[in-house]
């Protein structure tokens, strides 16, 4: 990732090869993030394509005040929101899950009793991988803000600071949304697997 700045500089001078390298580096992550926001692979592909078009048109204005990745993801999130406004796709979790949130969180938004890490609960790596894949698929059932933060933080491993910049939220808000998103996801997984935590 260290050479993003160099690739951006080359792209700003008209180097098409630099653009191809950036697309190869970020296409998969952008597509997954877009799908987690809009809930449809076809719409996600459209959003991702629109994002790259916006990057090509706006790369000369990129000043490097944030990392290229942060800027790129912010462009995608803005495009996804615009598309969501048009499409108005729902994708929220079952209403009965909301009543269980208070069991897990105190008034300050922190865990009452932190859950055991998923990796500690699963002995078999194959089962763990299957659960992880199912968790990613269930992300689309979370409310939009939670879905974006869980995906960026837990799947893409974007730092909390960068997430705050991408989404324009405070550190406290980001932590609460992350915890609530994880709790909803655990409840959805538990319901599918016939377990209740």
Image (spheres, rainbow, N blue to C red):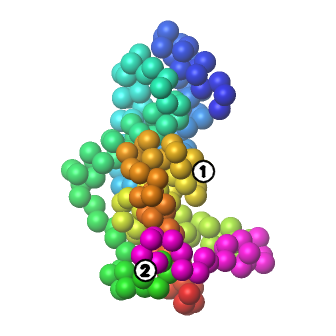
Task: Give the magenta range.
Answer: 106-125
Q: Is residue 93 magenta?
A: no
Crowdedness of circle 1 by 10 Å Cα count: few (<14), some, many (20+)? few
Q: Nearer the viewer, mark 2 or mark 1?
A: 2
Is 97 placed above or below 83 here? below
Residue 192, visible in the rendered structure: no
Task: Single out the residue that lies furthest toward the top.
Answer: 13
> Is 142 or 40 nearer to us in this picture?
142
Is 124 placed above or below 74 here? below
Q: Residue at x 44, y 41 (%)?
A: 165
Instruction: Give the residue number, with chain letter if any, for mark 2.
Output: 101
Going from N to C along the chain, the mark reached first, 2 or 1, is 2
Q: Which disc, if any, is residue 21?
A: none
Q: Residue at x 49, y 23 (%)?
A: 64
Residue 155 image position (x, y, % from top left): 58, 55
Instruction: Give the residue number, with chain letter if any, for mark 1.
Output: 157
Q: Residue at x 40, y 68 (%)?
A: 142
Task: Single out the residue that lies furthest toward the left.
Answer: 86
Look at the image and tell me in which quarter the C terminus lies: bottom right
Contact flag, marks 2 and 1 (Cβ < 8 Å): no
Q: Is residue 27 left or right of residue 125?
A: left
Q: Residue at x 28, y 61 (%)?
A: 89
Crowdedness of circle 2 by 10 Å Cα count: few (<14), some, many (20+)? some
Residue 87 image position (x, y, % from top left): 24, 54
> Is 107 or 191 nearer to us in this picture?
107
> Marks 2 and 1, how far apart in space?
24 Å
């Amino acid at each position: 990732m260290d050479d993003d700045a160099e690739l951006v500089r080359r792209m700003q001078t008209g180097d098409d090869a630099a653009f191809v390298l950036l697309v190869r580096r970020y296409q998969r992550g952008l597509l997954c993030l877009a799908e987690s926001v809009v809930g449809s692979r076809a719409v996600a592909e459209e959003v991702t394509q629109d994002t790259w078009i916006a990057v090509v048109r706006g790369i000369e204005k990129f000043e490097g005040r944030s990392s290229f990745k942060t800027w790129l993801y912010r462009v995608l999130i803005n495009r996804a929101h615009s598309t969501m406004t048009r499409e108005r796709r729902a994708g929220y979790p079952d209403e009965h899950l909301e009543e269980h949130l208070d069991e897990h969180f105190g008034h300050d938004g922190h865990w009452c009793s932190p859950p055991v890490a998923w990796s500690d609960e699963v002995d078999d790596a194959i089962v763990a991988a299957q659960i992880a894949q199912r968790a990613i698929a269930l992300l689309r059932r979370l409310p939009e803000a939670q879905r974006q933060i869980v995906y960026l933080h837990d799947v893409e491993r974007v730092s909390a600071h960068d997430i705050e910049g991408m989404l324009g939220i405070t550190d406290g808000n980001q932590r609460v949304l992350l915890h609530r998103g994880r709790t909803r996801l655990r409840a959805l997984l538990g319901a599918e697997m016939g377990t209740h935590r």
